[in-house]
Structure formats: structure tokens, C-alpha cells
């Protein structure tokens, strides 16, 4: 009897392990990035008042410094909305043309247009970084300004040495 009990105990221990439910898969980076970009364009966060909600620490710091170095907002290095490279988003339409995402970085190619016959598409690239607070814009590239971050660093240095 003792041998049978040991055999039964050994069978229990050697039996199939209890199945543990798998954790829910993490959202794919591209779905998170799409949601962030959509929030930028559909809900228009107040990036001027709260740049840290839209931009990463490096770009946010340069935008804040630009504001501090400027008496007249019209004379700021960043005197336009970087999400459209424009002054006014009224009636603007946007389209995500291409998205490339890794777990830590992403690149979103955007086209913005306005209604009317004289409207031409404005193309820009948002270079994104995943931060502790979520996705943020690390840099913005357009035809005229290949790197907003580099431009602001250069302009802020030039103006701070006057």
C-alpha cells in the first residue's frame, strides 16, 4: 500500500502542469503610434502651453528655450505649428502616408492639405520616441526644415550669445 501511495504521488507530480493563462499581448507599437498621431491631429493638444505632452524632453526643452529667448512670439524661431508647418489648422485635413515603428522609435510620414484649388500638400515626417509618458515627438522634418530639433538648437545658441 505504501508503494501504491508513492506511485500515485509520483504520477501526480509527473503529470501535466497546470495551464497558466497567457498574459494579454502588448499592443503593437504601430497601433500605439497611430493612436498618438491621431490624437495630435484630431484633438489638437495645446502644445504651446504644454509641450511635454506632445514632444520629448529634448525638443520640449528647445521649444521652451525658444520662448524664453523671444520677446515677441512672432520673432520666435518656432513661429508656426510644427504639426502642419503652417499658421492655421482651420479646415486642415491630414493623412498618415507611411508608418515605420519599432518598440522604441517610430517615423510617421504625414501629408496635410486644405480645401481649395490653390492648396498644395504639405509633407512632413514626425520622428517619434517612446518615453515613460508614452509616445512623443522627438523631431519634425519638412522640405524646408530637415530637422526642427537641429534648427532650434542652432537658433537658440545664436540668440543666447547676443
Image (cartoon, grey):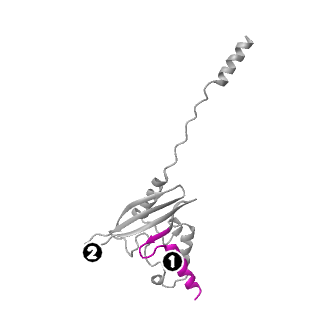
Is residue 4 left or right of 118 when viewed as pictured?
Answer: right
> Quarter-wise, where is residue 20 in the image?
top right
Name the disc covering residue 57, or none.
Answer: none
Q: Position of residue 79 (x, y in %)?
A: 45, 79
> Quarter-wise, where is residue 91 in the image?
bottom left
91 vs 133: above or below: below
91 vs 106: above or below: below
What residue span does the magenta drawing correspond to? 139-162
Is residue 86 left or right of 60 when viewed as pictured?
Answer: left
Q: Position of residue 81 (x, y in %)?
A: 43, 73
The residue pinned by badge 2 equals: 118
The residue depicted at 36 percent of the width and 67 percent of the height is 112
Q: Residue furthest right?
A: 2
Q: Residue furthest bottom?
A: 162
| Of residues 128 and 86, the one drawn nearer to the viewer in this rendering | 128
The residue depicted at 55 percent of the width and 41 percent of the height is 23
For the N terminus, which image quadrant? top right
The residue pinned by badge 1 equals: 151
Q: Position of residue 110 (x, y in %)?
A: 40, 65
Q: Secondary structure at mark 2?
A: loop
Disc nearer the start of the sequence (2/1): 2
Amino acid at each position: 500500500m505504501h508503494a501504491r501511495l508513492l506511485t500515485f504521488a509520483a504520477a501526480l507530480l509527473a503529470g501535466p502542469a497546470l495551464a497558466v493563462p497567457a498574459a494579454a499581448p502588448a499592443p503593437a507599437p504601430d497601433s500605439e503610434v497611430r493612436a498618438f498621431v491621431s490624437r495630435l491631429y484630431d484633438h489638437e493638444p495645446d502644445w504651446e502651453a504644454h509641450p511635454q505632452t506632445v514632444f520629448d524632453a529634448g525638443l520640449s526643452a528647445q521649444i521652451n528655450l525658444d520662448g524664453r529667448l523671444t520677446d515677441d512670439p512672432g520673432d520666435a524661431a518656432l513661429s508656426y505649428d510644427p504639426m502642419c508647418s503652417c499658421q492655421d489648422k482651420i479646415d486642415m485635413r491630414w493623412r498618415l502616408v507611411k508608418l515605420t515603428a519599432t518598440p522604441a522609435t517610430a517615423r510617421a510620414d504625414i501629408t496635410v492639405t486644405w480645401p481649395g484649388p490653390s492648396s498644395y500638400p504639405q509633407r512632413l515626417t514626425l520622428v517619434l520616441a517612446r518615453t515613460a509618458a508614452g509616445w512623443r515627438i522627438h523631431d519634425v522634418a519638412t522640405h524646408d526644415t530637415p530637422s526642427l530639433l537641429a534648427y532650434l538648437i542652432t537658433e537658440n545658441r545664436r540668440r543666447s550669445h547676443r
